[in-house]
Image: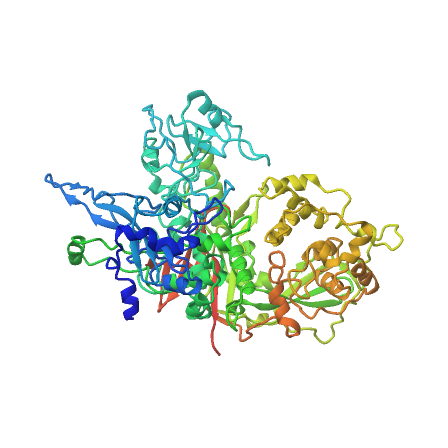
């Protein structure tokens, strides 16, 4: 403890100016100048949410450019031996009041050079920010104040300047990547708005030149409402908004339907990119739009046109009710990074589960101590960091009592940390994923499965926390003609419950509402009070348990196609049951739409009657005969079926990948090794192989005779021991075979594609794969292969028990589709419901349990 206190005294280890150059000589080989590809973390600690705003500031390693808070800097020093760090600190002080009573800034060499957000709970007019940088040399904690150009070696000065001037590590080349932070438009501050009396109505918008009613943009200078550009998929508009800019030069436009209290989508025609408009509220008010009353809608009609407490947005967020803020451990909010509320909601629910708390926060010291040299790229480290941030209470402290404020403000202000920004976490877990790495809204259910995938692939300790969600589904398929059956099992993590719309208890009201709504839209009047379909939960549960038709069913009993039905039951019940209400469907335009329904979800749920029973007395099993394979004329009927090593490479797929920024030769190899199966399959190959040293080397096409014998080597080696190359598996699956058959054949043939196909043709009734879950746990490009390999003959790890559950949380979605809207999480903690709405964490007064999208139930101990 004494050593630690001495280490951070600061100030009493100042060096005489003449000794600085000599002092740094031994460390010069370890000091690097950041290059264009280096990620510089100068605003956030790799292990915590400390920043230069924090009391201890942030230490940035001058070799790795990783940032560390005061509690974690010693760990990095011990692990790496790196001695030279740049210490960054932002001081926040109250401005000195002037003679007139106003606040005058005190210019104490004031300088801002850190790209930090200002503290949201402080009025920037009353406080002054000043950034301080100094070099710190460990282990003796020598400090060298900056700038000190005269005394420091040139390399050190250059390195410090480059580090301070480095861009955010979350920026990417892709223009729509969420990490590419929007910049404020140069026109926003000086935008001229014409006083022409234009007022924009709350609904009924259309393009003033072509009558289009979608993709509409409001020009912020003259109030013109015009359509956007046409897109390659046939959607969009006729480009009248752009034509208007070319004629007038009016630079900024906002997309109608995206205006919410949090902001709006703004585009600068002059700067040719999406921008931020810091004055958007004022600019919209000029045309009679109060953005605080707006919500995102697809057709331009505001949800607030209907009566209070009926709008989905208001009910789910509990608007209109004064909610009491909650502080302390487990009540920490998360900042919305721009359409990242789906991530915030899921992670709040995940870290309310004790098994995840124990696995990551309970193991935090061990995870941190054994983290790799770059902890920002380690899943378990970032999970532990996020879990600690949410559960420690360190970033959820109540505001200071009023009597203490004056006393504190006389000295330096110590800002209250309220909530955490999961930027580093999102950047890592979304890396390489085409959807989650974007700035678009996503489906919380898909993100939940993506997260479980990553948990499976990165085991922490002996117990995998995702085991609590895993269960086995028994699927019973019956041939309607022969009445024979087949039983199979698959692994799942979510119970997907259909919405039984036909069972609505208020059908007459719904019909009357729909007529009134259409009349109101036609007459451009405010919409009538919303009537939401009321669906009994029991009807949804009944719909889940009923048989469903099997498309394109081939009956092995009849040796022909026939009608077939399938029913699903639980072969095991999980510790935590996640129930998804299947509210989202596709409209005629292929845009996902949402069923706006109210379902009376129970607090206590018993699904014991859905327990699987297996083959019943009197039932006869379908023969295990595979469908016939149509084999073209060929000596063996094999080579003509093998698509992997084509003589011609699909250049269109190659160019699609190259346009994403991948090296041309890598794109050619990806398309070649995936057998011209398309850009999407080739993209997955690139993600799996981009770390390999010969990734961008020119493609060497083997002679035809070498193909089969080269096995996995020709395809770029298997990623796992005993696991066939995914490219070969995909090729066999593309011929119509099941995944487990493909894997079994490749294993039997030692990854020789020709022999594997011969094996399949000579084994029409292959033995069951030892891993019954193999076919279904392939959620994302077989990312779970390592976990499945671990289960071996024991099968998937499950925590079976009674099928009785109690509700403890739910995630709700507001908006018309998964592509837009907002997510909120409600959790039951310490006997009461709490709402987690990004940074806002409050005691819930009216938890809207009937409007949820994903529900979390915990098993009731027997």
> Which of 539/177 is in front?
177
Residue 801, compared with residue 558, is above or below; it is below
Is there any visible trace of residue 772 in the rendered image?
yes
Q: Is residue 757 left or right of residue 92?
A: right
Task: Return the x and y of residue 226 as percentages of the image width and height.
Answer: 46, 28
**Residue 483 at x, y = what percent?**
75, 66
Residue 351 relative to residue 541: left or right: left
Q: Position of residue 365 (x, y in %)?
A: 41, 69
Horizontal and vertical percent position of residue 603: 44, 67
Question: How many numbered circles are shown?
Answer: 0
Please, is residue 25 above or below residue 174 in the view? Answer: below
Residue at 61% across, 43% down: 663
Q: Residue furthest bottom?
A: 862
Residue 323 shows in this picture: no
Q: Is residue 428 left or right of residue 325?
A: right
The image quadrant that residue 305 belongs to is: top left
């Amino acid at each position: 403890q004494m050593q630690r206190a001495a280490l951070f005294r600061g100030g009493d280890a100042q060096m005489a100016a003449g000794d600085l150059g000599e002092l740094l000589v031994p460390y010069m080989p370890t000091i690097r100048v950041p290059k264009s590809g280096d990620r510089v973390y100068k605003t956030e600690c790799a292990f915590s949410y400390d920043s230069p705003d924090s009391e201890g500031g942030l230490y940035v390693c001058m070799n790795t450019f990783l940032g560390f808070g005061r509690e974690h800097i010693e760990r990095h020093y011990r692990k790496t031996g790196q001695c030279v760090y740049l210490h960054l600190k932002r001081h926040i002080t109250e401005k000195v009041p002037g003679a007139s009573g106003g606040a005058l800034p005190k210019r104490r060499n004031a300088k801002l050079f850190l790209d930090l957000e200002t503290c949201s709970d402080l009025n920037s007019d009353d406080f002054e920010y000043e950034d301080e940088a100094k070099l710190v040399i460990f282990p003796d904690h020598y400090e060298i104040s900056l700038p000190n150009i005269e005394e420091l070696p040139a390399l050190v000065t250059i390195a410090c300047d480059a580090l301070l001037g480095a861009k955010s590590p979350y920026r990417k080349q892709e223009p729509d990547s969420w990490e590419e932070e929007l910049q404020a438009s140069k026109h926003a501050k000086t935008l001229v708005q014409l006083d022409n009396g234009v007022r924009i109505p709350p609904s009924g918008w259309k393009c003033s030149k072509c009558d289009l009613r979608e993709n509409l943009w409001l020009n912020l200078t003259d109030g013109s409402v015009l359509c956007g550009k046409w897109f390659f998929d046939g959607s969009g508009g006729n480009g009248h908004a752009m034509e208007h800019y070319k004629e007038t030069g009016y630079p900024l436009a906002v997309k109608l339907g995206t205006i919410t209290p949090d902001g709006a989508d703004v585009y600068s025609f002059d700067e040719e990119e999406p921008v931020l408009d810091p004055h958007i509220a004022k600019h919209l008010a000029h045309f009679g739009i109060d953005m605080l009353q707006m919500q995102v809608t697809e057709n331009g009609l505001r949800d607030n046109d209907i009566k209070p407490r009926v709008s989905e947005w208001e009910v789910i967020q509990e608007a209109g009710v004064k909610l009491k803020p909650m502080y302390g451990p487990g009540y920490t909010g998360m900042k919305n990074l721009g359409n990242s509320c789906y991530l915030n909601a899921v992670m709040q629910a995940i870290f309310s589960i004790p098994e995840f708390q124990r696995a990551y926060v309970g193991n935090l010291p061990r995870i941190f101590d054994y983290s790799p040299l770059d902890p920002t790229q380690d899943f378990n480290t970032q999970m532990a960091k996020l879990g600690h941030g949410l559960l420690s209470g360190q970033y959820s402290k109540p505001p200071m009592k009023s009597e203490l404020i004056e006393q504190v403000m006389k000295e330096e202000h110590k800002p209250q940390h309220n909530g955490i920004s999961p930027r580093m976490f999102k950047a890592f877990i979304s890396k390489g994923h085409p959807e989650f790495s974007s700035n678009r809204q996503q489906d919380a259910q898909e993100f939940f499965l993506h997260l479980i995938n990553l948990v499976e692939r990165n085991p922490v300790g002996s117990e995998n926390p995702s085991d609590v969600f895993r269960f086995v589904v028994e699927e019973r398929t019956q041939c309607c003609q022969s009445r024979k059956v087949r039983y199979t099992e698959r692994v799942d993590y979510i119970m997907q419950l259909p919405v039984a719309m036909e069972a609505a208890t208020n059908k007459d009201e719904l019909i009357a509402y729909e007529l009134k709504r259409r009349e109101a839209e036609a007459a451009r009047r405010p919409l009538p009070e919303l009537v939401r379909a009321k669906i009994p939960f029991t009807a949804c549960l009944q719909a889940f348990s009923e048989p469903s038709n099997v498309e394109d069913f081939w009956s092995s009993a009849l040796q022909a196609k026939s009608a077939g039905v399938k029913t699903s039951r639980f072969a095991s019940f999980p510790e935590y049951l996640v129930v998804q209400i299947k509210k989202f469907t596709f409209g005629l335009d292929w845009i996902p739409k949402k069923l706006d329904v109210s379902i009376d979800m129970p607090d206590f749920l018993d699904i014991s009657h859905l327990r699987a029973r297996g083959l019943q007395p009197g039932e006869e099993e379908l023969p295990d005969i595979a469908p016939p394979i149509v084999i073209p004329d060929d000596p063996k009927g094999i080579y003509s079926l093998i698509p992997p090593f084509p003589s011609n490479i699909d250049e269109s797929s190659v160019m699609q990948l190259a346009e994403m920024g991948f090296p041309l030769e890598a794109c050619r190899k990806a398309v070649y090794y995936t057998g011209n199966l398309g850009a999407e399959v080739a993209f997955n190959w690139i993600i799996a192989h981009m770390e390999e040293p010969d990734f961008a080397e020119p493609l060497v096409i083997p002679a035809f005779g070498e193909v089969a014998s080269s096995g996995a080597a020709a395809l770029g080696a298997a990623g796992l021991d005993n696991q066939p190359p995914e490219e070969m598996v995909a090729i066999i699956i593309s011929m119509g075979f099941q995944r487990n058959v493909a894997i079994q054949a490749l294993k039997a043939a030692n990854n020789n594609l020709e022999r594997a196909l011969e094996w399949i043709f000579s084994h029409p009734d292959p033995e069951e794969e030892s891993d019954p879950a193999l076919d279904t746990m392939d959620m994302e490009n077989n990312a779970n292969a390592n976990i499945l390999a671990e289960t071996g003959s024991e099968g998937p790890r499950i925590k079976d028990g009674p099928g009785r559950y109690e509700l403890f949380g739910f995630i709700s979605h507001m908006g018309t589709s998964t592509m837009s809207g907002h997510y909120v999480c409600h959790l039951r903690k310490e006997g009461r419901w709490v709402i987690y709405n990004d940074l806002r964490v409050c005691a819930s007064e009216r938890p809207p349990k009937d409007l949820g999208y994903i529900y979390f139930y915990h098993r009731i101990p027997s």
